[in-house]
Image (tube, helix red, strand yellow):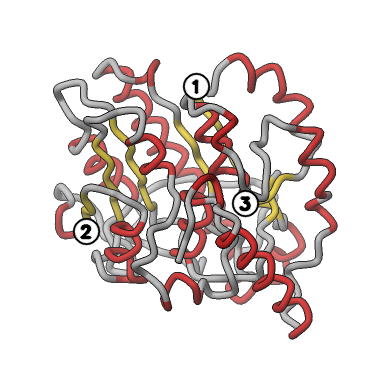
Amino acid sequence: KVRQLTQGGASIGGQLVVMSGLHGLLNAPFCSACPYNIYPSVVRAQKEVYDSLYAYTVVSSDKYFWRQSEVSDALGFDALFDKFDAVPGGVNKHGWADDASMMKLALDKIPKDGTPFISLIVTSDMHSPYTRDEAILFDATFPGVEDEILSEYMRRARRLDEQLGKFIAELKNIGVYKNTLIVITSDHQVPETYCSEAMNAWKSSYIPVLFVNAGEQWSDLNSQASQVVFCHSQLYPTMLKFVGVKPDKYVGMFPPMTDIERTLEYDFDHLEYTATSNEKLKMIYDLEEKMMLCGYFGTKLH
């Protein structure tokens, strides 16, 4: 279970938190105000290990939506592909390429010569609002769920799950699955604005995180970790650890998720950073400033 410490926020802010470990502000103003900062990132850290690493982002909208192009550059990605690069497929009601098209595009861009790669895939079918989207062609019924919005949300989740299954199956077919770390998560929790009363009663305040091929160390910790609440910013050091970057790289604020004892000391489940009062927002700004000025994960931001 992962708790996002700030309330709401733009989706691009969530990507920054996951890929850099930096704590995002409400609506990610540090991202839009300073898009050209050289952020620490999983990509930059891995490029220190693999000289020929190819890193690319796949987005369902256009490259400039949410300042995606600028942020991809700031995080060190080599290429950004959008809906106009997608193979022929469906388009959802937002006018974005659907998840099936995004998965196909991401697979198509995997280097065929064995070059190590990082692929960030920003899916779209789960995006709010959750009114019926007839363009999402997938039949799924949920006995006992009468609320239309909740049912539509579940239908989209089931379809995304199916697409992820096909993506992983293809990774196996092309022979790269065993050597690929797969992280499945969300940029932020479901916003209440688009939820029905029944859905608000059902939804969780936590963000799900799934690790595939994380190794025996995580498998051994998994039962214990399922009882611990982590924070969004811990995903960055955790991914670095799983792909072999040594722990002495971590000079920042938050420990990797494999460090259960240090995580418990923060008690993320009871940190009240979600409030938007001036006092709470100042706490968020102070926290982020510390992270940037301390040389977060070995990288100083100016």
Residue displayed at 26% across by 41% down: 106
Mark closer to the chain start, 1 or 3: 1
Q: Which amino acid, mark 1?
A: Asn
According to the picture, the residue beneath numbered tag 1 turns out to be 213
Q: Residue 43 carries which label?
A: none
> Quick one: 264 or 225, which is closer to the camera?
264
According to the picture, the residue beneath numbered tag 3 turns out to be 232
111 relative to 78, above or below = above
Are there few (<14), some (14-19), or many (20+) residues within 10 Å of tag 1?
Answer: some
The nearer-to-camera label among 1 and 3 is 3
Residues at marks 3 and 2, CA–CA distance in whole angstroms: 27 Å
Q: Which mark is residue 83?
A: 2
Residue displayed at 30% across by 66% down: 70
91 relative to 176, above or below = below
Q: Give percent across and percent down for residue 101.
A: 25, 47
In the image, is 10 to the left or to the right of 110?
A: right
When asked about the image quadrant of residue 174, the answer is top left
The nearer-to-camera label among 3 and 2 is 3
Is label 1 in a helix, a strand or a loop?
Answer: loop
Mark closer to the chain start, 1 or 2: 2
Is label 3 in a helix, a strand or a loop?
Answer: helix
Residue displayed at 18% across by 36% down: 108
- Which part of the image, by quadrant, shows the C terminus? bottom left
